[in-house]
Amino acid sequence: MKAYIQEEFKKIYGNTPDKVFFAPARVNLIGEHIDYNGGLVMPCALGNGTYLAIRKTTDNTFTFRSLNFPEIVHKIPVNTSGYAKEDALWINYPLGCIDYFIREGKTISGLEFLFYGNIPNGGGLSSSASIELVTSFALNNLFNLGKTQVELVKISQQVENKFVGVNCGIMDQFAIGMGKKDQAIILDCQTLEYSYTPFVLKDNTLLIINTNKERKLADSKYNERRATCEAALEIFNKTESFKDLCSIPVDYFEENKHLLTEEMQKRVKHVIYENLRVKESEKALKSGDIEKFGKLMSASHKSLMEDYEVTGKELDTIYLESVDFKGVTGVRMTGAGFGGCAIALVKNDRVEAYKKYIEKIYTDKIGYAPSIYDVSIGEGTREI
Ligand code: GLA
């Protein structure tokens, strides 16, 4: 892939790039919508992701191109005082990273960028965080900015929150920055302490099922869920001082949930019990109990469907049609929801039967086909 993108860069810009970088996509195995509530999450980095070939220039211009949108060229003059968001363009991700460093007083000179991504677009596998990480990593490397990998993770989240305007948690950027081959990350989003656990699937295969639903309104609904959680915490904290929703003991929640509106009760119930499911999942995976882990995955989806209400009929069709299918160990949506992808753990000897079944029933019920991919778990952001 490196040779291919170098070759394309040369064809487009007439020069060889200085360097080529890669940032993966991610899936979250369990712990959904709790990163911004101080919870535990268990994501991993994928083998697919975003490639960036880049070259320093002397013409005081940033040129952005992508092999995914070959006809589009964006040229932006190098500026010393920050940038404004462009209207709904993918270049906001790299532009936001440049803007961050410029506001910090760093000097970033002219650059030619060529991106290439093999992450399904809009599939909820964090293509945006992948572009942020690959860009901030490249800038840090080319201009010797001295940031650690975890600092680049935090900077990329800031770009998404403040520049792009999506109030996401830290999970995606962390998984993409810090992923390790064949390992799941267990990340405490309150303290940023983390560890790895081998993701050993025994006789199972991990599949990604893309709903292929356009994720309209996903960002605004995401911000809405986050605001509801913050409002609920504020109500409990009139008399308590919890750091976040995931620090609330189950007993306290059960005894005091009447203080919340009905809608808030459902949201907070998901958050508190999902955090417990991640703890149990860690135990299950560490002791090799993949059946137990599968059950926790499915319980997570049910909670996201009934209480957090971020699934929708496409993801629910996948869940409902899969959960009792022979050979399915566990199934759930992954990421923000409202479309995007589901993941399924399926017994190796049932994978073909399952793929056939889910493809047909989903197409019959939804009106268009899903896409199904085999997953490999890869390394985090790096120079290649
Ligand atoms: C999106 C966000 C993450 C996380 C997930 C839901 O992917 O970017 O921070 O909140 O949704 O778990």
Image (cartoon, rainbow, N blue to C red):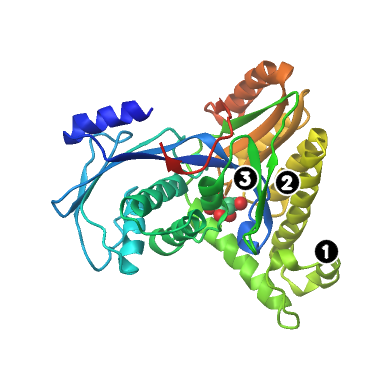
Q: Which residue position is annotated with label 2?
A: 300
Q: Does the residue labelled 1 lie within 8 Å of ligand 1?
A: no
Q: How far apart are marks 3 and 1 (CA)?
A: 24 Å
Along the viewing direction, whichever of 92 and 263 lies nearer the viewer = 92
Q: What residue type is labelled 3?
A: Pro
Q: In the rendered image of this protein, does residue 114 appear above or below residue 107?
A: above
Along the viewing direction, whichever of 103 and 55 lies nearer the viewer = 55
Tag 3's secondary structure?
A: strand
Q: Which residue position is annotated with label 3?
A: 43
**Tag 2: Cα neighbours inside 10 Å, few (<14), some, or many (≥20)?**
many
Q: Which amino acid does label 2 sit on?
A: Ser
Residue at the extreme bottom of the image, as rendered:
239
* Percent of width and height locating residue 142: 31, 50
Label annotation for residue 250: 1
N-terminal-most mark, 3 or 1: 3
N-terminal-most mark, 2 or 1: 1
